Amino acid sequence: MKGRNVPTKKCSKCKEILPLNYFGKLSYASDGLRYRCRQCIKVDKAEFRKKNPNRFKSQVHAWIKANPEKAAIGNRRRALRWNENNRQKIKEKTKKWANENPGLRSFYSAQRRQASTTQTIAMTEEQIAEMKSIYDRAKSISKQTGVLHHVDHIIPLKAKNCSGLNVPWNLHVITAQENMRKGNRMPCESEHIALSLVNC
């Protein structure tokens, strides 16, 4: 920026003089920063992986084995980022699969309809109207924000040990990204679940 003295540092590899935020942290360095810039380190890592594929894979597998929960979270985040960046590709792939597998498509649709029907209790007109308003709200929020929102079952219709009910007090509006991240998992295993939400 003009008129401002921005602190800089010279990269030991590319010799470029760059702002300090271009360098990662290194605790034992005199200035607390790495000697090479982030881009040079990125290139070096890519070259190392290319030259040592087996060693890199073994390191990755060892880390995954030692950190299964972190690895699972990382995989979900990467999947969500990919889905977010490839919506059209997913849409085309889904459409192609549906056209090539009409029988399976009908079967899965029927299963979903049956779950929604069998897991819905008798409701008043007000409660039915409330359910409709929740779905309308999801569409409205999506349109206003430009971010796709879904109506999610707080307790999934097909959870591992319980099945949620298709009732207004078991529904809430969340982003599509949050919904995909959640899947059919329970909100929290340690959380107290009201019996009015589930069919155990």
Image (cartoon, grey):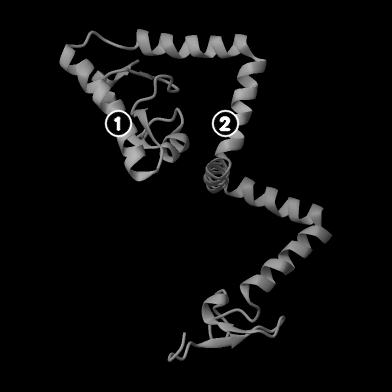
The image shows residue 44 at horizontal and vertical percentages of: 73, 69
The image shows residue 181 at horizontal and vertical percentages of: 46, 38
Which one is nearer the viewer's eye here, 26 or 141? 141
The image shows residue 171 at horizontal and vertical percentages of: 30, 27
Q: Is residue 194 visible?
A: no
The numbered dot on residue 136 is none
Q: Is residue 116 visible?
A: yes
- In this picture, is 35 found above or below 177? below
Identify the residue shown where x is 46% and y is 31%: 183
Q: Is residue 58 left or right of residue 148?
A: right
Which one is nearer the viewer's eye here, 156 or 176? 176
> Disc 2 residue type?
Lys
Q: Can you identify the residue that label 1 sits on?
A: 172
Which one is nearer the viewer's eye here, 50 or 108? 108
> Disc 1 residue type?
His
Identify the residue shown where x is 69% and y is 48%: 61
Q: Is residue 200 left or right of residue 56?
A: left
Q: Can you identify the residue that label 2 sits on?
A: 91
Around disc 2, counting alpha carbons within 10 Å, would you say few (fewer than 14), some (14 to 19), or many (20 or more)?
Answer: few
Identify the residue shown where x is 24% and y is 25%: 133
- In this picture, is 178 found above or below 102? below
Callout 1 touching callout 2 (CB < 8 Å): no
Q: Residue furthest right?
A: 51
Looking at the image, tell me whether mark 1 or mark 2 is earlier in sequence order: 2
Identify the residue shown where x is 66% and y is 78%: 36
The image shows residue 154 at horizontal and vertical percentages of: 33, 29
* Distance (Cα) linking label 1 and label 2: 25 Å
Please tell me whether mark 1 or mark 2 is closer to you in this view.
2
Q: Is residue 56 left or right of residue 67?
A: right
Q: Quadrant of residue 94?
A: top right
Disc 1, SS: strand
